[in-house]
Image (cartoon, rainbow, N blue to C red):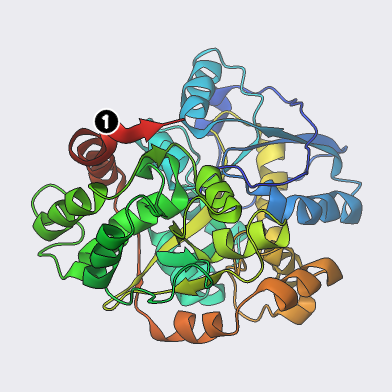
C-alpha cells in the first residue's frame, strides 16, 4: 500500500466541481448509462501519489474526447482524511469528488463505510473483462477491491534490502544474517514506521514468509517468529522515521548503510539523485513478493451522466497505450496492470530513466518469486497497532 507521496518536483492543479444527489444512485439501472449531451468537468482526488503515474493518461482522455470532458481537475489529499470528507458530502447530498485514486487504505475504509459505487459488479458491461486483461498480480489485487475499485497501476513491491556496496562488504542474504549484521553494525540499518511507509509495511508483511511463521495472514496469532525477530532487530536500530523519504535521505547521505526498500523506492530516488546510482538491492532467503496496487474508485452520489463518463474513462485508462505511462520514472515499477505493455511503449523519458537506473535482475525476480497479497484491512490495522506498541513506539521520530 504505497500511500506516501513520491519524492518529486511535480505539482498538481487543485479544484473540484460537480454536485449530485445520492438518491439518484439508487434509481440507476445496471449496465450502460447515457453519456452527457455537453462536456462535463471531472474532479479527481489522489491519496496515493498515483497521479505521478497516470496524470498524462488522464489528460489524454480529455484531449481524445473533448465532446465528453471539458476539463479534469486534480487534487491531492491525505488518505486517512478523505473517507470522512466524502461521507460528509454524501450526507449533505453534495458530492463534488468524481473519482478517487487510492491504495488499499482509503479503498478499505470506503468499503467499510459504504462510500463507493460497486462499479465492477453493477456496470461490468461498461468495463473491460478485468480477469482477462490483468496480469496475475494485478488480478489478485483486484480481488481485494470487493468490486468497488478498479486497479489502475500495479507493482510487486518488496520487501528488498537496499545498500551502499562500498559500505557493506558482507551483504546479508537471510534474516539471520541481517540480524547478525545489525548487531555488528549498530544503528547502520533502518526502516520506517510501517503505518506510514510502503517499504516499512511490506517488510512487516513479508517477514512471516521469510521466517516461516505459522500464519502469514494472522499478525495476532500467527506471527510468533516475526514479532520476536522485529524486537531483536530493533535493539540495533537507532530510530524509526515516520516516512520512507527519510530512510532514502539517510542512505544517500551515508548515515545508514542498509535500508528496507521496494522496486519503486529503489529506482525513483536514484533517478532523482537522492540515493547514489551505485546502490544495490538484495533479497533474503525464503522471500516472497508482497504486492501493491492503486485503484480508481467512484463515490456514491455522482450523477448518471458523470458515471457514464467515469466508466468510459476507466476503460480508457486500462488500454495498453495509456498503461504504458505508469512506468513513469520507476516510482511504482513496473507499473502496468494489464497484459501486453512493454517498456518500449512508454514515453521516452520513462524508457531512459528505467534503462539507466532499473535493474536487469528485476525481471527474473518478478517471474520467479511467489506473489502474496497484503493483509486484509482489519489484520493490517492490528499489525500496525502491535508494531507501534511492542516494537517501535518508543523510537519513532519525525
Residue that badge 1 annotates:
394
Q: Residue furthest top?
A: 92
- Residue 218 in view (yes/no): no
Vertical relation: 103 (above or below) 241: below
Task: Name the image quarter holding residue 182.
Answer: bottom left
Vertical relation: 81 (above or below) 197: above
Task: Name the image quarter holding residue 75.
Answer: top right
Residue 286 appears left or right of 95:
left
- From the top left corner, tell me how far across and down residue 241 is, in percent: 43, 38
Q: Nearer the viewer, residue 85 or 48?
A: 48
Residue 201 appears left or right of 220:
right
- Residue 202 in view (yes/no): yes
Number of numbered callouts drawn: 1
Q: Residue at x 8, y 51 (%)?
A: 221
Q: Residue at x 66, y 68 (%)?
A: 277
- From the top left corner, tell me how far across and down residue 49 is, in percent: 62, 45
Q: Residue at x 41, y 45 (%)?
A: 192
- From the top left corner, tell me how far across and down residue 115 is, in percent: 46, 32
- From the top left corner, tell me how far across and down residue 351 is, in percent: 78, 74
Vertical relation: 178 (above or below) 112: below
Query: What element does badge 1 sit on?
Result: helix
Mark 1 is surrounded, within 10 Å at the Cα level, by few (under 14), some (14 to 19) or many (20 or more) other residues, namely few
Q: Nearer the viewer, residue 392 or 30?
A: 392
Residue 43 appears left or right of 374:
right
Q: Residue at x 65, y 63 (%)?
A: 276
Amino acid at each position: 500500500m504505497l500511500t506516501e507521496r513520491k519524492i518529486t518536483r511535480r505539482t498538481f492543479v487543485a479544484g473540484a466541481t460537480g454536485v449530485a444527489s445520492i438518491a439518484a444512485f439508487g434509481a440507476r439501472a445496471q449496465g450502460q448509462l447515457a453519456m452527457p449531451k455537453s462536456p462535463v468537468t471531472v474532479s479527481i482526488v489522489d491519496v496515493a501519489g498515483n497521479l505521478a503515474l497516470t496524470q498524462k493518461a488522464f489528460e489524454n482522455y480529455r484531449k481524445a474526447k473533448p465532446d465528453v470532458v471539458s476539463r479534469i481537475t486534480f487534487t491531492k489529499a491525505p488518505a486517512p482524511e478523505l473517507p470522512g470528507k466524502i461521507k460528509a458530502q454524501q450526507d449533505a447530498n453534495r458530492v463534488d469528488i468524481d473519482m478517487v485514486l487510492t491504495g488499499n487504505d482509503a479503498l478499505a475504509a470506503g468499503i467499510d463505510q459504504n462510500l463507493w459505487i460497486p462499479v465492477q459488479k453493477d456496470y461490468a458491461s461498461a468495463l473491460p473483462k478485468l480477469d482477462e486483461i490483468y496480469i496475475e498480480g494485478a488480478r489478485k489485487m483486484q480481488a481485494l477491491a470487493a468490486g468497488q475499485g478498479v486497479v489502475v497501476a500495479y507493482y510487486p513491491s518488496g520487501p528488498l534490502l537496499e545498500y551502499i556496496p562500498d559500505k557493506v562488504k558482507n551483504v546479508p542474504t537471510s534474516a539471520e544474517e541481517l540480524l547478525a549484521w545489525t548487531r555488528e553494525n549498530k544503528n547502520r540499518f533502518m526502516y520506517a514506521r510501517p503505518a506510514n511507509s510502503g517499504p516499512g509495511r511490506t517488510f512487516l508483511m513479508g517477514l512471516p514468509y521469510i521466517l516461516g511463521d505459522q500464519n502469514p495472514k494472522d499478525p495476532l496469532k500467527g506471527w510468533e517468529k516475526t514479532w520476536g525477530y522485529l524486537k531483536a532487530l530493533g535493539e540495533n536500530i537507532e530510530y524509526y522515521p515516520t516516512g520512507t523519504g527519510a530512510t532514502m535521505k539517510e542512505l544517500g547521505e551515508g548515515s545508514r548503510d542498509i535500508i528496507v526498500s521496494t522496486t519503486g523506492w529503489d529506482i525513483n530516488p536514484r533517478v532523482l539523485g537522492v540515493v547514489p546510482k551505485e546502490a544495490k538491492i538484495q533479497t533474503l532467503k525464503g522471500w516472497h513478493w508482497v504486492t501493491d496496487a492503486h485503484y480508481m474508485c467512484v463515490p456514491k452520489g455522482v450523477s448518471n451522466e458523470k458515471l457514464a463518463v467515469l466508466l468510459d474513462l476507466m476503460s480508457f485508462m486500462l488500454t495498453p497505450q495509456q498503461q504504458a505511462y505508469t512506468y513513469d520514472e520507476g516510482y511504482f515499477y513496473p507499473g502496468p496492470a494489464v497484459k501486453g505493455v512493454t517498456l518500449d511503449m512508454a514515453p521516452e523519458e520513462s524508457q531512459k530513466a528505467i534503462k539507466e537506473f532499473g535493474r536487469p535482475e528485476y525481471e527474473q525476480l518478478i517471474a520467479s518469486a511467489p506473489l502474496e497479497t497484503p493483509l486484509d484491512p482489519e489484520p493490517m490495522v492490528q499489525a500496525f497497532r502491535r508494531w507501534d506498541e511492542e516494537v517501535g513506539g518508543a523510537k519513532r521520530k519525525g
